[in-house]
Image (cartoon, rainbow, N blue to C red):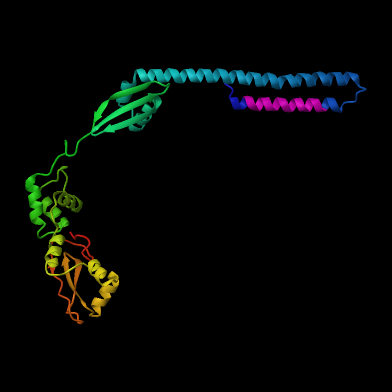
């Protein structure tokens, strides 16, 4: 079947031939009546051919469009009748399942009321449908929880270990998290936060706070200076003393103001072998 593009090129070629025939007729000697009559007849024939070709092109295009639209409508009707079969077919991939609803649904409106959602659909063609309300999963509903004894053990280990060390210890004992997966530093931290269990760092921080120590950020606000300037002031022995300690290989510092102008010697770092990492400033837990 000749494509529409080829038919378009054919129409253009016929128009060009008609222009050439007209040029030959206009250039002939009017005194040569026989030649002039022949060229005039050829010109008239050439003028009819582009119009006939254009009309044929439009007719074939309309027929093709009507046939294509009918094929599409028939395919959509077949798909709507066998939607469940096509959806559950083993050869239907997820990408195809995403495209399938678009063949039937123009748009969808979701209205939530509490934990219930009503769904209103507008189908292609204008038909409107309202589906039965869908109940959303409530908080904690159907979610597997970590056993209470595991939570208690994490709280006990957090007294002397960081999150990473706790994860290593739980995995060594063969204890899995609620997803039946090995523990990681992140999953231990999430469990602590959910149950309000303080970390090793928070415990040390609280103990030093009771002795009058504060973080660099808090002291810098009192002095009206930056954290960097605070640390420099402590190195120069100006009204601030520093207490440094480590959790694993990660170092943290706390500060307090002195009553006199001389800075006492910085206390030696206290090492806790329950974590790893490196840092300053009591801002994150080492594990």
Residue 105: x and y, percent?
A: 38, 26
Seen as rendered, the residue at the extreme right is 31
Comparing 124 with 79, the one in front is 124
* Quarter in which the N terminus is drawn: top right
Seen as rendered, the residue at the extreme left is 149
Residue at position x 6%, y 47% in the image: 149
Q: Quadrant of residue 127?
A: top left
* Quarter in which the C terminus is drawn: bottom left
- Is residue 18 in the magenta section? yes
- In the figure, 140 relative to 235: above or below? above
Residue at position x 35%, y 30% in the image: 109
- In the figure, 197 relative to 45: above or below? below
- In the figure, 126 relative to 226: above or below? above
- Is residue 276 in the magenta section? no
Residue at position x 17%, y 67% in the image: 246
Kindly tell me whether residue 83 is visible in this rendering.
yes
Q: Is residue 96 left or right of residue 170?
A: right
Kindly tell me whether residue 91 is visible in this rendering.
no
Q: Quadrant of residue 218?
A: bottom left
Residue 250: x and y, percent?
A: 20, 65
Range drawn in magenta: 7-23
Q: Is residue 203 left or right of residue 137?
A: left
Residue 46: x and y, percent?
A: 75, 21
Mostly what secondary structure, the magenta segment? Answer: helix
Q: Is residue 8 left or right of residue 246?
A: right
Residue 143: x and y, percent?
A: 16, 38
- In the figure, 58 relative to 251: above or below? above
């Amino acid at each position: 079947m000749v494509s529409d593009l080829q038919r378009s090129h054919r129409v253009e070629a016929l128009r060009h031939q008609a222009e050439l025939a007209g040029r030959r007729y206009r250039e002939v000697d009017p005194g040569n009546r026989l030649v002039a009559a022949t060229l005039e007849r050829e010109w008239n024939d050439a003028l009819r051919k582009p119009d006939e070709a254009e009309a044929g092109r439009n007719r074939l295009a309309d027929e093709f469009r009507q046939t294509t639209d009918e094929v599409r409508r028939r395919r959509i009707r077949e798909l709507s009748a066998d939607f469940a079969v096509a959806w559950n077919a083993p050869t239907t991939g997820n990408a195809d399942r995403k495209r399938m609803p678009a063949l039937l649904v123009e748009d969808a409106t979701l209205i939530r009321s509490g934990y219930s959602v009503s769904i209103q659909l507008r189908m292609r063609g204008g038909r409107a449908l309202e589906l039965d309300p869908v109940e959303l999963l409530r908080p904690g509903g159907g979610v597997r929880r970590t056993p209470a004894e595991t939570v208690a053990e994490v709280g006990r280990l957090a007294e002397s270990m960081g999150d990473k060390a706790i994860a290593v210890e739980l995995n060594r004992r063969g204890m899995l998290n609620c997803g039946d997966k090995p523990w990681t530093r992140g999953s231990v931290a999430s469990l602590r936060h959910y149950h309000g269990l303080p970390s090793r760092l928070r415990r040390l921080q609280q103990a030093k706070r009771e002795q009058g120590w504060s973080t660099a950020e808090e002291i810098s606000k009192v002095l009206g200076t930056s954290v960097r300037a605070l640390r420099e002031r402590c190195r120069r022995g100006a009204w601030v003393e520093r207490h440094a300690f480590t959790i694993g290989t990660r170092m943290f510092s706390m500060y307090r103001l002195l009553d006199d102008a001389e800075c006492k010697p910085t206390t030696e770092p206290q090492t806790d072998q329950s974590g790893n990492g490196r840092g300053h400033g009591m801002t994150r837990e080492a594990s």
